[in-house]
Image: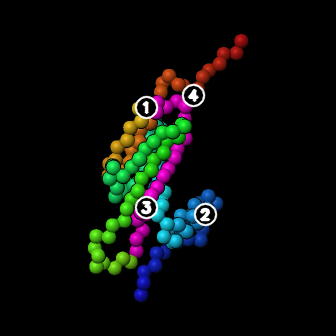
Amino acid sequence: MSLIRYNTNDYVPATFSSLIDRFFNDTMTRSGGSTFQPRVDIVENDNAFELHVAVPGMNKEDFSIEVKDNFLTVSGERKFTSEKKDANWHSIETQFGQFSRSFALPENVDSAKIAAKYNNGILEVSIPKDEKKALKTTIKVN
């Protein structure tokens, strides 16, 4: 007898976009692909934008964060290590391999002051806003 992963939403995608995403992600995983796309939460407050990237099981040295042409790219690699050589794996749902996520930065950020920290499996990237570069201006009609 073998164990098979069961998902009640296998045949009912929420959106067309999720259907396409799932097709490509599942195809890569089934064919031995080594890429994945971590989940990201984006938060905005008065002073900054924050990216919360869910990447448990990694070290801070495994990440690369770059800003180029007004795009912020977060990339890295989670490697699979089989510590128990005599174990029979029945299911591996944790995603392994390389990942890369890019985000277009608005004009009102100070890219020189971007900071990151990794805590409890969440990579937090803080992107401070530049008060001098206001996106909203008021124009007086004469």
- The segment highlighted magenta reads 91-112
Q: Amino acid at mark 1?
A: Ala
Residue of label 1: 112
Residue drawn 39% across the image and 49% down it: 63
**Front disc: 1 or 2:** 1
Callouts 3 and 4 close, C-beta under 8 Å: no
Q: Pick whichever, 41 or 27, lies toward us.
A: 27
Disc 2 on helix, strand or loop? helix
Between disc 3 and disc 1, whose residue precedes? Answer: 3
* Residue depicted at 42% across the width and 53% down the height: 76
Q: Amino acid at mark 3?
A: Gly
Write down the residue under mark 2. Answer: 19
79 vs 46: above or below: below
Q: Earlier in the sequence, mark 3 or mark 2?
A: 2
Q: Is residue 65 above or below residue 3?
A: above
Q: CA distance from mark 1 to mark 2?
A: 38 Å
Label 1 packing within 10 angstroms: few (<14), some (14-19), many (20+):
few
Question: Would you say 62 lies left or right of 25 here?
Answer: left
In x, y percent, where is residue 45?
45, 35
Q: Residue furthest right?
A: 142
**Residue identified by numbered label 3:** 97
34 left or right of 123 in image: right
Q: Is residue 65 magenta?
A: no
Q: Which residue matches tag 4?
A: 135
Q: Residue 15, which numbered label?
A: none
Instruction: Please tell me whether mark 3 sits on a helix, a strand or a loop.
Output: strand
Q: Position of residue 136 (x, y in %)?
A: 58, 26
For marks 2 and 4, give the CA distance: 35 Å
Task: Tell how many labels.
Answer: 4
